[in-house]
Amino acid sequence: MQSMYFTEEHQLFRESLKDFLQKEVVPHIEEWETSGVIDRSIWAKFGEMGYFGLSTPEVYGGLGLDLFYTVILLEELQKINSGGFAAAVWAHVYLAMTHLNKNANDAQKKAYLIPSVNGEKIGCLGVTEPFGGSDVAGMRTTATKKGDTYVINGSKTFITNGVYGDYIILAVKTDTSLGNRGISVFIVDLKSEGVSASKLNKLGWRASDTAELAFDNVIVPEANLMGEEGKGFTFIMEAFSLERLIMGINAHARAEYALEYALQYMSERETFGKPINQYQALRHRIADLHADMDMCKQYNYSVVYKMDKGEYVVREATISKLRSTKMADDVAYDCLQFLGGYGYIEDYPMARLLRDSRLGPIGGGTSEILREIIAKIIIDRKDYRPPSK
């Protein structure tokens, strides 16, 4: 594949990753989808291959590679048709570890980042609460200073890896009178006394564990505070662009997978003496879907390029998630229709893909919230700037 973004080294990495996923992951997907539990041993294998440390500096055990290696990892994870497994991986690497890479001090990185790169510890991110998701400043979970510790009380929900993970990057209020300036971020061990997890029963992403977490007088060392008190909101806002871009990339990749599968099926399925890919109504719909997918894909690549160069891409990443996730839902819906009755059968991939895709316009900021962010930028001329350190 010729590309202005991917080098020969990228392509060799993609082929190696494909082989790894087919050998180590695909044979277990059905079991993990049914049980809702991913075998812990796969994390160590990912760690051994360096897949968790693609963007982590070498000094902390990573590979220090450009963001297009991340794109390849995300794309190939979508093409094994388990949104849940893919989510468990990228929630660990690009939600939890992103904060460790950017905001943790050296001691915290040695305690949590290096084991995360190696697959020895699994992380998650805790921002959303039962009483509010996108309203970050309205969170109610608190941390009260007590000597050289903090005491945390509150709850979080929709936390991927929250049941079987080892630690959480947790956003809390250290000063309830300051709004978003009173938010801080802690690293909290999920085995700490006072932490309890309830596993949520989801429509899709069945292989991953998603938790509602309660924190009842959980004692956390002061050393686990990331940065300074009150810096949490800027940390969270800075990470949102990457999260939204990741969900946009996931969307174009699963749409591409759905189209490839549908095209193969349509070339083999015959009615009235000819394959169904020869019917104009279906051919033209495929053409539209492919065009929409490719436009999102190329746009997403351009945003990755900007982000990799250090640009602050709030607008672009928000557009990526908004348009790509809607496109992926449309593609999944129509590709299921192309399969007819077989699309509705669980032995075929489309039913799961449709369920998994539906979280795209919800998680990481709903489409309604994203439209308001874009409206503020283009109508109200709001200028989102990188947070000052």
Image (tube, rainbow, N blue to C red):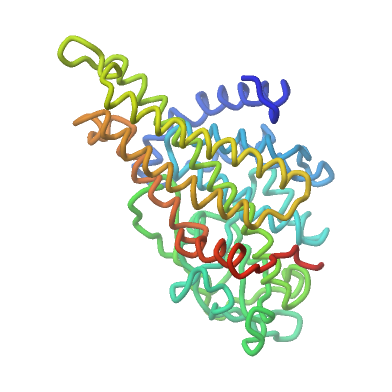
Does residue 229 appear in the picture of this structure?
yes
Which residue extends farthest front?
379
Check the image and report above or below for 129 versus 113.
below
Q: Position of residue 42 (x, y in %)?
A: 55, 37
Left or right of 317 in this view: 324: left
Quadrant for residue 110, please give it.
bottom right
Q: Residue at x 78, y 49 (%)?
A: 310
Give the total number of marks visible in the rendering.
Answer: 0
Left or right of 105 in this view: 28: left
Check the image and report above or below for 255 versus 384.
above
**Which image quarter holds the C terminus?**
bottom right
Which residue extends farthest top?
273
Q: Residue at x 63, y 48 (%)?
A: 93
Does residue 45 appear in the picture of this structure?
no
Quadrant for residue 118, please give it.
top right
Left or right of 5 in this view: 157: left
Check the image and report above or below for 7 versus 87.
above
Q: Position of residue 224 (x, y in %)?
A: 72, 69
Q: Which residue is more in the foreground, 188 or 373?
A: 373
Q: Position of residue 377 (x, y in %)?
A: 62, 64
Q: Residue at x 65, y 65 (%)?
A: 236
Q: Which residue is more in the foreground, 324 or 48?
A: 324
Check the image and report above or below for 210 versus 88.
below
**Which image quarter holds the N terminus?**
top right
Which residue extends farthest bottom?
177
Q: Residue at x 73, y 73 (%)?
A: 231
Q: Position of residue 91 (x, y in %)?
A: 56, 51
